[in-house]
Amino acid sequence: MIKYIFRRLLYAIPIAFGVSVVCFSLVYLAPGDPLQTILPSDASADTIAMVKAAYGFDRPIPIQFLKWLGRVLVGDFGESIATRRPVLLEVSGAMSNTATLVMFAVPLSFSLGYVMGAIAGCFPGRMLDRAITGTAVMGVSVPNYWLGIVLVIIFAVEMMALPATGMGANGSTAFSVFRWSDDRFLVLPVITLSMVPIGIIARTTRAAVAEVLNQDFVTTLRAKGLSEFAVVRHVLKNALPQVLAVMGLQFGYLIGGSILVETVFTWPGSGFLLSKAIINRDVPVLQGTILALSMVFVATNLLVDLLQSMIDPRIRRS
Amino acid sequence: MFGITRETGMTKRSTPSLTGRIFGAVLGGLLAAVPATLHAESVLTVGMTAGDIPLTTGNPDQGFEGFRFVGYNLYDSLALWDLSERDKPSDIKPGLATEWQVDPNNYRRWILKLRQSVKWHDGCPFTADDVLWNFARVTDKDAPQFFTQQMALSRTYVTNFESVEKIDDNTVAITTKVVESLFPYSMSYLLMVSRCRAEALKYDWAAYANAPSGTGPYRFDRMVAHERLELTPNKDYWDPKRVPKHDRLVLIPMPEAATRAAALMTGQVNFIEAPAPDTIDRLKSAGMQIVTNKYPHNWPYTLNFVRGPMTDIRVRRAANYALNRAEFVELLNGLAIEEYATMPPGTPYYGNPVRYEYNPEKAKALLKEAGCMPCKLTIAISTSGSGQMQPLPMNELFKSQMEAVGFQIDFKVMDWNSLVEIGRSGVPKYPEIDGYNGSRALLDPLSALIKPVWKIHWSPAGSNWGHFYDPEIEALVGQILNDFDAEKRLTELTKLHELENDRALMIWVVHDLNPRALSPKLTGFVQAQNWFQDLTPIVVHP
Amino acid sequence: MAQSPMAQTMSQTAILDRSPAEGDEQVAPALKVRGYWASVFYRLRYDPVTMFFGAIVLLIVLAAIFAPWLAPFDPYRESIIGRLKPFGWKSHLLGTDELGRDLLSRLLYGGRVSLLMGVVPVCIATVVGGGLGIVGGFAGKSVNTAIMRTMDVFYAFPSVLLAVAISGAMGGGIGNGMIALSLVFTPAMCRVAETATAQVKSLDFVEAARATGAGTLTILRHHILGNVLGPVFIYASTLVSVGILLASGLSFLGLGVRPPTADWGLMLSTLRQSIYVNPVICALPGAAIFVTSICFNLVSDGIRAAMDVRM
């Protein structure tokens, strides 16, 4: 077991390196000059050259990558071109705000999705199953940013019951989950964000449960005289590894894919930071954000793999 | 979780039981109609179109909106803009310099008298040495206070600056590189920051950004990066009439127009910039005040005079005759006025320019005469931006009107920063672009009329994007800059405006009317005819 | 001659024609596949839900293809006077948008772009990713490791993030959007194909084929491909709706097609400001995305059930 964990960890390193190469090279795919965010439209050419040298853009690209990697490994992600704040600070602040959203979206969507899927899987083909499957499909098919806009119109503008935008009445640094005046801001984004994971997890759970129910050992358990409730418990436990894999992926989706929801609700999370960095061509922030988000995803996948193999030792990825 | 501390709230903790939560949800919903502020203070909360909080380290970014909400609130410049009147065009007035005049023996030298008894927010007194220190901060690479970012942001205003010297404790003298009678206008764009504070922080500008100190009517209170900037009144401001009449100013970046409207209607903010024209009716029915005023703003197409169809004056005139500007105003729900020349009517040097009234037949005839059929144009536009109004629908309308008379328009669409880059680099780098659609601020005659036609400003050295040159106009510019008689200069500026209009220098479309939406609880706002506005007189009623 | 157990488990009612003749490999797989597919269609015919939504998908696709003939108005013709008009105004069945263009025509034309941006990346990913996966699964150790580890690097990014990052870095536009989405889907397709290939490759009948002297390409073509296509096709069909949603998301963020091109995601974004003037009109593009996505989802679910393949 330990050997497997060790091997799995070791395997994550080249992945992480590959991710960093991709991150770094992404930002050089683009046309456009990262300095234009700080220079006014009528700056002269020698001004541009002077500022470029000061920020270090005049070196060849592979050298830039190695220097960047070296700094990243000691935690120095550089400074944002636009604000001169350390990128690490920007990214960690933004990610903790996204984490606040995810902290609520995960329990909501995972538990709701799992329960719905389990019920549907236990009663396949019946009305309940159809209703739940139908809801799950709708959740997966709706463009979540559209849903967000609709919810804002209904609940914020028309009913004036919830706020339309932002994180907290006094900004994200003063945000406290224990205050309703701040929690109000969570309601709509969390609901919007949860729709897709609920759908996917419900469908996966349903499929897994239905499949497990067809296996022989279930018949054996029933023949043994176990109560239906106990049988269900066994079934759910066996269905868990498959669902876990999907949950891990969905966690990654929530962390990395919140950009659309955060844009609609102006939630100052990592997705919003990313979209701003793209618009401003703020290269250090762009690289730092993508790197941080994908590292979280890599770590999540690693964890899920380990968890899966612990629960079901038959599963061992090579 | 990630090592970020959270401030504890002012209210007591509630037990997070499920029923409590549900009750809270319902009750919170009912109570939410009341703007959620527990302070007894009056708070002016502004939703800006900027994508982020403007820089607080001196000259701001985010275009002139940065000056409007942060720059001129935290800081002053040597000359300030008079923002007190609605019905007169806005001009500069004394700021940290109480008077200025050119040295009669040397027209390149300006003598400025400095204001007395002014204190920085940190308590240090404002002195002549501070002025020298500030100029060095953005021009002298060897000075310890030199700051690259500020140099980049201020460079265009000190192009003609050569040196500054202290004459005595109350007077300084600035020397320019060439004679420029309009130089005082440039002085209004350079903000003065506190040497005391910078030295106390040992020139750590990142730390300074969180603890800025200026002489302006507001002091820095608190900033949450990317989310909000909170300013409080400077009770010791040197102009007692401009001490803010509210207790707190909160600035929130909200680049999406729909979000701004929603935030205003839910009470999260009580002042928004540039509401989308289609939201105006809804805002009005929710009781909001919509204020507009003309201001020196231009929404044109800046043209290529090196190659392409636009080098022919007949084609340029045809383009101007092709536009039905009334439809643009309709598209914008009345929030614009038709534009036939660079300046909006009512400007002192407006004069009597040609009105290129909508005349598609004349346009077609001109194109035929010029032999440009069909007339292919490549135009660069942006998706949003400071002063760009509603660029996408407006450009679609532009295209359909131009194509109706025989043009063929191909758009290069990009984000605002990319368009700004094209504007800065000019035709040498982008020869294939026939025109670009960037809004123009026309605050001072130099920026408005002279830079776009002056030969030494040929891009990329300056803002003459298309390399326009006309000997009569060039001679007139030289005259204006050497003329220190304000009245005579006014006549010359008027002639320049008319000449530019006659040469169809640009394709003119509309002037923005600078719409803003205010909560009914706000009174006292006077909307000046300027890109900058004075927020200090606003009173926020409960 | 051994038969692929996958084909066997796939359908219990399949009519499996087996040609026992030696060296008759050309014939046997073809009959096998036909029998299998026949059983799939048989199942589908008695699944009313899937048939119904399949018909809708067909309608949507046909409407998109024949948009130039079906659209009552020119989707680019503006009329400032007729902005944001309600249903039925001057024979505009679904009203007009913020520039006075007919909404029905724009929805029809928008369908072309949205479907294109959803389907083309999936096709590219299927060919490229599927091809790589089959090669990897078949070739064995070192080639397999090389291919799969490279794919793992891209797999390490959440899909929305990768799509936005690539598309944003390249400057947006429909071409870059399609490239970005293809890059997002390729690793997943590769994995599916590789897993299926590896499973099949290890089975007896492949070894037997090799023992009779069949070349690599023959084995690939007749044994591997037929059995791998199933899972690959199913996975691809689930990706189409994801592709449509991702593409509309990119357009919403401004990274997709440029105006005045009609595209559902872009229409959602531009109509957002006008939501207070005519909310129903502004919801229509979102409804179009929603309906299309649901239909593709349900159809792919139905096909999967009919093919009864475990992923």
Image: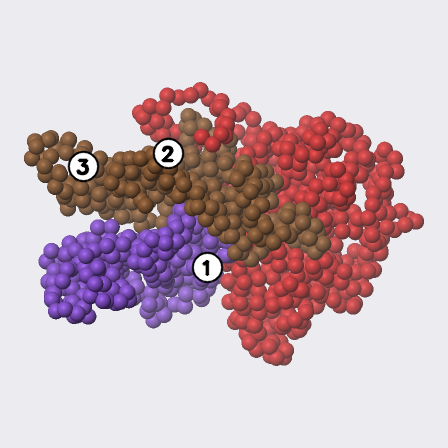
- Tell me the colour chain B is drawn in: red
Identify the amino acid type marked 2.
Phe
Q: Nearer the viewer, residue C15 or B514?
A: C15
Q: Residue at x 11, y 66 (%)?
A: C20
Dot 3 lies on which element?
helix
Q: Chain of mark 3?
A: A
Dot 2 lies on which element?
helix
Q: Residue at x 72, y 36 (%)?
A: B193
User: Few, some or many C-alpha atoms within 10 Å of disc 2 (few <14, some 14-19, many ≥20)?
Assistant: some
Q: Which mark is residue A235?
A: 3
Where is residue A284? Give x, y as percent: 56, 45
Task: Identify the residue under disc 1.
Answer: C176
User: Few, some or many C-alpha atoms within 10 Å of disc 3 (few <14, some 14-19, many ≥20)?
Assistant: many
Residues under numbered marks 3 and 2 in contact, where contact means CB atoms less than 8 Å apart: no
Q: Is residue A317 visible?
A: yes
Q: Which mark is residue A104?
A: 2
Horizontal side, residue A182 vs residue B535: left or right: left
